[in-house]
Amino acid sequence: MTEDSADPAPADRAGRRDALAEAVAELVLREGLGTMGLRGLARRLGTSDRMLIYYFGSKDALVTGVLARIGEKLSVLLQAYSAGPPVSPGAFLGQVLALGRDPVVMPFMRVWTDVIARAAAGEAPYDTVAKAVVADWTAWIGTRLVPDPDRPCPPAALLSIVEGVTLLEMACPGSTAAAGPWLAEALTRAGGPSA
Amino acid sequence: MTEDSADPAPADRAGRRDALAEAVAELVLREGLGTMGLRGLARRLGTSDRMLIYYFGSKDALVTGVLARIGEKLSVLLQAYSAGPPVSPGAFLGQVLALGRDPVVMPFMRVWTDVIARAAAGEAPYDTVAKAVVADWTAWIGTRLVPDPDRPCPPAALLSIVEGVTLLEMACPGSTAAAGPWLAEALTRAGGPSA
DNA sequence: CCTTCCATGAAGCGACTGCTACATTATCGC
DNA sequence: GCGATAATGTAGCAGTCGCTTCATGGAAGG
């Protein structure tokens, strides 16, 4: 009775670790990566920095674990969109930018953009995580695009736009209001009358 | 004789402050914003943190002063490009992305993208600086674009692309190799056959 | 020569960081 | 009940951070 349950009270070590990771993940999604000091983090979680190190071994392991969990949560969210048929770059950009304004998805976009921004500054362990994330995303975008033998769209082009818009929006809220739709339409027009 | 000279040996207080700012600016352009701790900064400059605070008052004042100086240096570099006639969004993007691969201009792009990334993370004083910089750049881009009454290109759209490409290139070098040219051509095609 | 003020060095403060050593409590097998 | 093991609290270490205090050197002015 105390062994086989997979109920929301795992109570063993791995379960506790998982519960902590989940709590940190939701906190990060709510408040961003800026609040990742061990003491402050533990205080918000109702535990101590001592415990975080005890369960995760190091802060870097905690960060990578939490980011992996956030990645899984997002991939679940995106499965609904991955199921549809491949689309043109312009349509894809329009979908993703609209998705980025969805209050459920927006925190994920902000976190990943923050990760990439920290990676750009060379901050560990975000640099390592970011490389894997960028690789994953370009691969995913590649599967979402209808192939164009003439002018194949590099997935990194769309990823750059999404990251750029998200970054600018985080730094200067409202500054990209008109940019997203214009870009999506421009890419659509670029692909449309030519092929 | 000790008063009116504007020679490269100012020797008075404002001059010394300026020389320090210039040295920090060149250091930042060479090594990025990651090296902005007062002690390490002072060591590389052959002075002490004590002196940096003495001349600048605070680290935030130093940072904003240095960033302002970097901005002036870049605007001087860009004057050559600002002189030409307005161009289409696609042509502008191609010019700027090519410029961003120029080894002289690239450090500036990286620094500004880093500033905006730190602003996105809410880090002071970069948040304040970034707002001003984004405002300046969108204005400048606006003056560089040939007006299009039908589908006016929001300057923030181009700025987003440039920032996104630079950010991704900083986080994952090489990942955007094909993205830039494709985007420039796509925007050109979007504007071309329609108008 | 003596004072006065500017520039600089040396040391340190307090707050923070990730992390650890020690001690304590709680839990479980016997 | 008892001993072992796991979980947790307390305090602290060594480091960095921006910044300050005190002391000193050294040049300018009377």
Image (cartoon, coloured by chain):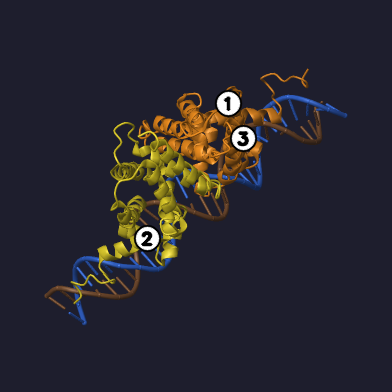
Chain colours: A yellow, B orange, C brown, D blue
Residue B182 horizontal side relative to residue A140, left or right: right
Viewer-nearest of discs 3 and 2: 3
Near-viewer residue (A178 or A106): A178
Q: Position of residue B167 (x, y in %)?
A: 44, 38
Against A84, residue C26 (above or below) is below
What amino acid is at disc 3? Answer: Ala
Q: Is residue B44 visible?
A: no
What is the chain identity of the residue bearing mark 1? Answer: B
Residue that carries the numbered disc 1 in the rendered image: B78
**Viewer-closest of B96 and B34:** B96
Q: Disc number at residue B114?
A: none
Determine if residue B192 is in view: yes
Which residue occupies the foreground of this view, B128 or B39?
B128
Q: Give the number of marks.
A: 3
Q: Which residue is at the front of the view, A65 or A158?
A: A158
Label 3 marks which chain's residue?
A: B
The amino acid sitting under disc 1 is: Leu
Measured as percent of width and height from the top left, residue A194 is found at 38, 33
**Residue assigned mark 3:** B68
Screen quadrant of the N terminus of chain B: top right
In space, the residues marked 3 and 2 are separated at their CA atoms by 43 Å
Q: How much space separates mark 2 and mark 1, taking CA atoms? A: 52 Å
Host chain of mark 2: A
Q: Position of residue B192 (x, y in %)?
A: 47, 31
**Residue annotated with mark 2:** A50
